[in-house]
Amino acid sequence: MRQGWIMYAAMSGSASTSRFWPLPGLARIPGSRLLTSTKKTLEMKKVAAEIAEVAECKTPDKKAKIVPRLQTVRVYRWNPETPDVKPYMQQFSIDLNKCGTMVLDVLILIKAQHDPTLSFRRSCREGICGCCGMNINGVNTLACITKVKESPKPLVIYPLPHAYVIRDLVPDMEQFLEQFRKIDPYLKRPGEDEFLGMRQILQSPRDREKLDGFYECVMCACCTYSCPPYWWLGDKYLGPAVLLQAYRWVIDSRDMAHKERLAKLQDFYSVFRCKTIFNCTKTCPKGLNPAKAIVQLKRLLAGFAKKEKPDLDTPLPNPCGGEEQYPCRKE
């Protein structure tokens, strides 16, 4: 005969006593252990159901068909090996589901699956090297950071305008790079050749902030080949990208050859052919302002502004370790 337990409480004034009395014929009341195990079982089933639901979502349904996202792409083509064939536009139909989201991914897919003879430059795919500069839908920009928008209109790709074309989307950058070399894009400290590598050249945070917006240029030439004065006088006018770099080195507080740099630009064509129409600023894929740098160069050349003295002056090293200073820099 099963027995159960009931509790009898007797209250007497402020004191209370509790006692358990065994009674025959009563079923045992379920304990807390049984309730806890039932609760855990329910929670485990709930978690297992959630895991199965997530796995089902992540597992692709083989029966479901992926709808192709077709995009028409028109690419400029010219091959120097066949000079009798004039430049033409070749059209491709690309499934955007099979490539990445950038224009460069589309070109890579075309070269891999449609036409292996397509030529274009690419390197970093991060908008850092500036190799993949081209004209996309009428705008000079970098193919690796330009997203493809699915549209009924075709995606039209040309090489950079007003530049000699080597092949397909590869422009000739020889003149542009030669002009870049003319401005001496490196630090110059006349008379300190003997001290190179012997100490760090100091620069204050305020002087460092002056370079913001100028040192980020990747020399992709998108701004230069969007400038009408450069189209007309590209052999004499240096162009926005080169002039931005020239100003970057002129205002650098560590550079001591700013007068020499400005003297090289003191003519009728190098700087003053700029008409300040801001084509360069609008098309820069890095969001820089070459027009601002050119205006500041004009002010320096015209004498309306002067380069500020550096906040920190780096002393010459004394290799002897004595109190006497090392001989002065050469004049």
Image (tube, rainbow, N blue to C red):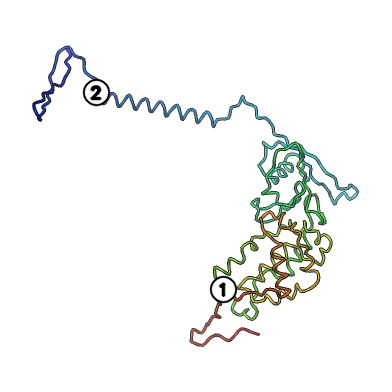
- Residue at image location 77% in from the left, 40% down from the top: 154
Q: Which residue is mark 1?
A: 201
- Residue at image location 88% in from the left, 48% down from the top: 86
Q: Which residue is mark 2?
A: 31
- Residue flagged by tag 2: what amino acid is it? Gly
- Residue flagged by tag 1: what amino acid is it? Ile
State the quadrant of the N terminus. Answer: top left
State the quadrant of the C terminus. Answer: bottom right
Numbered label attached to residue 44: none
Which of the two discs, 2 and 1, labels the residue nearer the N terminus?
Answer: 2
- Residue at image location 81% in from the left, 63% down from the top: 234
Q: Secondary structure at mark 2?
A: loop
Count residues near mark 2 (Cα–Cα under 10 Å), then give few for <14, some for 14-19, many for 20+.
few
Query: Residue 50 or 294: which is nearer the viewer?
Result: 294
79 displayed left or right of 48: right
For the residues labelled 2 and 1, say whether their Cβ atoms are less than 8 Å apart. Answer: no
For residue 266, which quarter of the picture? Answer: bottom right
Residue 271, horizontal then vertical, whole percent: 76, 68
